[in-house]
Image: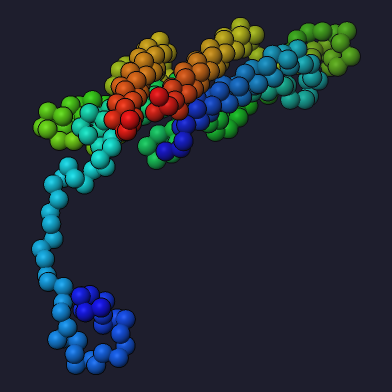
Amino acid sequence: MKELHGQHHFATDRRTPHSLASALPRTPEVDRVLLHPSATRPMIGGDVTSMAWKAALSGLSQRQRVTADNIANINTPGFLAGRVDFESSLRGQLLSGDTPQITGGTVARSLEPTNTNGNNVILDQETLIATETGLRYQLALNALDGKYNNLRVALRTQ
Amino acid sequence: MALFGTLGIAGSGLIANRKWLDAVSDNISNINTVRRTDEDAFQERFVVAQAVDYGSGTGGVRVARAEFGSAEGRMVYEPNHPLADAEGYVKYPDIDLGDQMTQMMIAQRAYQANLAIVERSTNMYQAALQLGRG
């Protein structure tokens, strides 16, 4: 019991006189240990490569949603097609050595010429984007799946 | 952001285009609806599409309202028709079949395009659900 630090002893033993509280051994004050930023990320799946693939997956699924939005509005008067850019911020983060964050892309409105009802969605263009986005999504998924397979191999104990 | 949001957006496109097809088929089925000259002719149905804002809303499209064309119709001389007036005229709706067929094709193609997105995004989600299975 005497080895316990003051706070605990003081709380459990109600017979301790109040005046003794200051005489009891106290936990020494320690400076908070500053963790390296890498230690605050999850150990599994938080490395640069995994985070880059995850950011890509997030951006690609957003692009697919915006493409679906464009096609849903293919006949809506005055609708301007949306374009998603996540590559430039991801590239910037990777070039500066930061671990990519999953922030999602930025949506900008296409400035291409509109037709007579003020709409500038071109179906074949959107279909191409949808196809390419789907393939890129599969690529990122396969890469991430490979990372997880490596983890599974590493976790195997015998 | 809704789970499987792409499906909701493409689904809204399917619904809007189906409503447009409904309006077109209503117009075509009533293209020969004869009325008395003192009555309103069958009015052409229009659907008004409106984008649901992607940033603040879910994205996609909705049919904001239906609008109706002219009730004037066109006068046709059919003196033997039971609804004909004293001068022998009846009222036909002012709907152009060629125009309706064009609209039907546009709506049908747009419907197919949205359906293609549904299939594509389903494949994407299916693949994502296999992640980490090994």
Give the residue at the far front of this rendering. Answer: A158
The answer to which of B20 and A3 lies nearer the viewer is: A3
Residue at 79% across, 16% down: B34
Q: Residue B78: which quarter of the image?
A: top right
Point out residue A150 in the picture as x, y percentages from the top left corner.
29, 26
Residue B112 is left or right of residue B70, and the answer is left
The answer to which of B45 and A15 lies nearer the viewer is: A15
Point out residue A28 in the picture as x, y percentages from the top left corner.
12, 71
Residue at 79% across, 19% down: B35
The answer to which of A18 and A133 lies nearer the viewer is: A18
Which quadrant is the N terminus of chain B positioned in?
top left
The answer to whether any part of residue B49 appears in the image is: no
Q: Residue A10: which quarter of the image?
A: bottom left
Q: Residue B72: which quarter of the image?
A: top right
Residue at 39% across, 28% down: B132
Point out residue A96 in the picture as x, y percentages from the top left corner.
10, 32
Residue at 16% across, 32% down: A93
Residue B89 is left or right of residue A130, and the answer is right
Point out residue A129 in the picture as x, y percentages from the top left corner.
36, 16
Residue B133 is left or right of residue B93, and the answer is left
